[in-house]
Amino acid sequence: MTRTSVGILRGGPSSEYSLSLKTGAAMLAALPEDEYDVRDIFVDKSGLWHLRGTPADPARALRQVDVVLNALHGGPGEDGTAQRIFERFRVPYSGSRPLPSALSLNKARAREIFQKAGIATPRGFAFTLDNPMNTQQMADFIFSEFGPPYIVKPVSEGAGNGILYVATIIELPDAIGDVLDAYGAALVEEYLLGEEASVAVTERFRGEDLYVFPPAHVEVPSGHLHLRYDHHDQGLIQHTVPSSFSHAEKKALADLARAAHRALGLSHFSRADIILTRNGPKILEMNTNPGLYPGASLPHMLESVGSSIKEYVRHAVNLAKWG
């Protein structure tokens, strides 16, 4: 039997480097050698590609595979950069196309799309370094729209990187300035009380065009008000599936995740971070390359429906082949 040659792209220059390595490792372990010729395509922190331990330009690496599984988290792996490379060399790949990937990673642009589609989001505003207002004026404007507490986050980071909790208006100018200086763009949102959920969707799975997995109830470590990168990296987040959400709440979460996936024009799979408030669910952000690393929510969702990482990764290969 002819084996399918699968390249698994992992690592990369983004702040989610270590999570990407772990997701890639899970993918490598999931594909049996008798069916797949698996190539570990490692991207170092400078962005240099490697194949079999030696530097290799993308053209050389991609010429040796039939399909690519994109395990890069954040940065070039999810902003359309890697996707454009795959398309340049006409290699089938998993995940969303370049533009939807870029729109999803940019939280400010994604918010605009959600709002136009009638999808609920927290109140918030984005600022960039070229904004004529200084940080005090930005803070005053935010305060005129809604009061504290606030969440200040980078526009295009994931896994809790750079997120700041701001309890009072007095702290807000410095928080905005810190995020702008570090990342070039800042999103200020209202801090919402509620229960956080993670909801994954996958296309053409188990007879459904867009299958929604049962939601995972997400609990941050004790004493923390929001998720941080080290919580992901160290596996400190508790994901409970099946969750204690009511049937109506689970349906609302599923409907929101499905609507967000479609509104952004995503492909193959995605995972939504949602806050369930007393006024209903509101979407926080979308992830176009859901993590499979230890401590991620998706493996728990897979297990809850009798699936596995192995089945999911094999399905990802098929989705890439099908286009």
Image (spheres, helix red, strand yellow):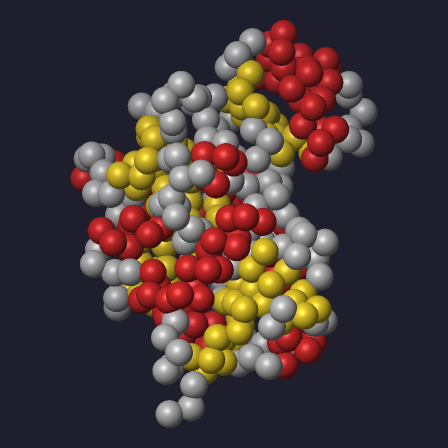
- Left or right: 322, with 14 as reference point: left
Residue at coordinates 26% horizontally, 66% vertically from top-left?
206
Please tell me which residue lies in front, 63 or 28: 28
Q: Position of residue 128 (x, y in %)?
A: 73, 32
Q: Position of residue 84 (x, y in %)?
A: 66, 65
Picture quadrant of residue 183: top right
**In the picture shown, does residue 139 fall above or below 83?**
above
Please tell me which residue lies in front, 280 or 29: 29
Please tell me which residue lies in front, 230 or 198: 230
Residue at coordinates 60% horizontally, 81% vertically from top-left?
64
Quadrant where the N terminus is found in the figure: bottom left
Q: Position of residue 270 (x, y in %)?
A: 44, 53
Extreme-bottom residue of the structure: 1
Q: Is residue 178 visible?
A: yes
Q: Position of residue 132 (x, y in %)?
A: 81, 25
Residue at coordinates 62% horizontally, 37% vertically from top-left?
155
**In the picture shown, does residue 198 fall above or below 43?**
above
Please tell me which residue lies in front, 307 or 261: 307
**In the picture shown, does residue 69 fall above or below 282?**
below
Picture quadrant of residue 164: top right
Q: Is residue 76 visible?
A: no
Count all numbered tags in the image, as a single digit.
0
